[in-house]
Image (spheres, rainbow, N blue to C red):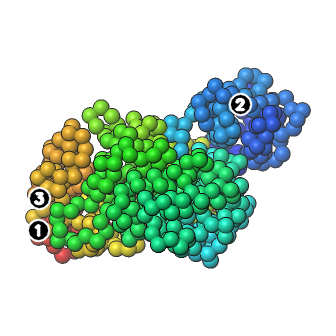
Amino acid sequence: MENFKEYYAWLQPGPVGCSASCSPMRPGRGVSLREVCVHGSEQADFAARELRGGLNWLAGQNICDENSGYKITLGLDPGIQAQGYRINGDGNGSFITGADREGLIYGVFAFLGKVGMGEDLPGISAESAPVVRKRILNHWDNMDGSVERGYSGKSLFFRDGRFCYDPSRMKDYARLLASVGINELSINNVNVTDASARLITPELLPEAAELAAIFRPFGVRLILAVDFESPVKLGGLNTADPLNGEVAAWWKNAARVVYDYIPDLAGFVVKADSEFRDGPAALGRTQADGANTVARALKDFGGTVYWRCFVYNCRQDWRDAKTDRPKAAFEHFYPLDGTFDENVVLQIKNGPVDFQVREPVSPLFGRMKHTKQAVEFQITQEYTGQQIDLYNLAVQWEEFFAAPISEHRLARDIMGKEAAAIAGVANTGCDGNWTGHLLAQANLYAFGRMAWDPGLTAKQVTSEWVCRTFGKNTEFDAITGMMLASRGVYEKYASPLGLGWMVNINHHYGPSPEGYEYMKWGTYHRADNTAVGVDRTAKGTGFAGQYEPWLEALYSDVKTCPEELLLFFHRVRYDYRLKSGKTLLQHIYDTHFEGAAEVQAFMDIWDSLKGRLPQGAYESVADRLKRQLQNALEWRDVVNAYFYRKTGVGDEMGREIYG
Ligand code: GCU
């Protein structure tokens, strides 16, 4: 462990800090890393270099020697499913075979991962191909160096309106992303500023191309976020109307220029008609008109338009109880199913509102049968503790994939089918450990792994991360356990039963039960002295009707509605008895007390590992946990006081609630 650095994330140099059962330097059948040599065809050149470098890294010295006895052979086999790989070995050597260059890189990283976890070289065998072919990381980085909803320091790419990065760090980043299968990367915020709008012009394209060149060998293609208004702002036209011939021609020309510089650009991502940004609706056109015009410009170059569905009325009057924000995306996009071009992918947030702790699956998934979709997750912890609080997102993603979208299908079933892509909003920045909270690295890791294979469980990917980061040691199972519990703990103190939005306005950290209650954002829980929550059944706003009938029925009945979503779908009296037999009010009190106590328990677990973990890592996480406890106590007391003041009913157990 003496070589451990938070910066290396899950690619720690070996040998991993080990229990006796784990000794990568002396694998069981007597093959030492010192006896290894790597052979590959010319096409495998880059992968072979990465493998040699990776093995040297794990061994802590230059081990690869042409004349060594144990040969690792790299090659291609187009018979393997695209981007996939196969690894096998016999007593004399191992074979890593990729379907293509990407597959070979993934095979090399899979192999290195297993070596790092102490597997016996000849025994390593694996076969895998991604379920979802586009696994995308979206950075919300601004060119001034700030990061929208970023909690890990400044932008990795930009400073003061220019590109600015350390090329060797960038290469490390590319390696990190490729090692978990991420293959597309958008670098600038979807809220495109004037400066970043010019990323598609010759002023900034040469530097964008240099960046693309760093990521390219790792199989990671860039995406640029573009402004729908570009034809006006950059082109000097008097409209951005997508049905205007000059506008279409402008986009075509812009795309030609972009692809001159970056021939393998994956495409553009667009946030239009959303949160004060212009879009086709503002011009009387449909979202399909807008998306298709941009898509047609990219088509000849093989580019894709990722068109975001985060479209809603952000100027709502709280008095208006008919308009219901979760309904918005479906209302805008569902009627257009089948009218989007082949190279348009609709990028849909996992839930119908906005990355809350608990939301149902967006009703758009699976109901749009003739339109390519991407799920958008938020890896950066905006509403989920801002990388101060521990929050393992893999748990939430596993629930997403396992959630029904109709009577016979789970969300997982459309991955790699209608869902052609999975995107995640990045949680990385210039902090030394990339993610601020060391344990938040696991969220990036899990994102890549679960985008590759949505069938993986949170437990699998989290324990894998713990093992690769800290080493294989049964004592570290406690870390995995605490990480797996963390989502539930945060939910207990932050957001009862799918209510959401009790956060402080703007920055979204910490409690403010009515922070958003009288605002224009359409995010209301409407608590009064008898009940809380929004009736979204046919008797209420009708949101539940956007699901297929079987699912609508399930959500609409308080008895069958999953209890953790009760207040998302229903308005419920405080004296309503939950399945536990507790009243809703008592449940709120209990979970808030429990949540804060469980953070204290996390601190105890972490303390018990002192001395077994690298000191710096121990301290940095201990410090975050201390801050988390403050936050949890604040949430506990504010939320409990809020409902106590509404109801006048105290805690059955007589614990202190501030009146
Ligand atoms: C959230 C977030 C914004 C972001 C938006 C989006 O609302 O608070 O900062 O711009 O999502 O997804 O576009």
Give the secondary structure at mark 2.
strand
Q: In which quarter of the image is residue 597?
A: bottom left
- Distance, label 3 to label 1, CA atoms, is 9 Å
Give the secondary structure at mark 3.
strand
Label 3 crowd (10 A; few <14 / some 14-19 / many >=20): some
Furthest-front residue in this view: 245
- Distance, label 2 to label 3, CA atoms, is 63 Å
| Image: 167 above or below 86 | below
Pick the front one: 241 or 376: 241
Q: In which quarter of the image is residue 320?
A: bottom left
Residue 378 lies, in percent from the top left, at 44, 56
Image quarter in which the C terminus is found? bottom left
**Residue labelled 3 has its Cβ within 8 Å of some atom of ligand 1:** no
Q: Which amino acid does label 2 sit on?
A: Leu
Residue carrying label 2: 76
Residue 550 lies, in percent from the top left, at 21, 37
Instruction: Return the mark for residue 529.
Output: 1
Label 2 crowd (10 A; few <14 / some 14-19 / many >=20): many
Residue for point 69% across, 65% down: 207
Q: Of marks 2 and 3, which one's residue comes earlier in the chain? A: 2
Q: Of marks 2 and 1, which one's residue comes earlier in the chain? A: 2
Contact (CB < 8 A) between labels 2 and 1? no
**612 displayed left or right of 482:** right
Furthest-right residue in this view: 67
- Which of discs 2 and 1 lies nearer the camera? The answer is 2
| Image: 591 above or below 93 | below
- Whether residue 374 is visible here, answered yes or no, is no
**117 displayed left or right of 400:** right
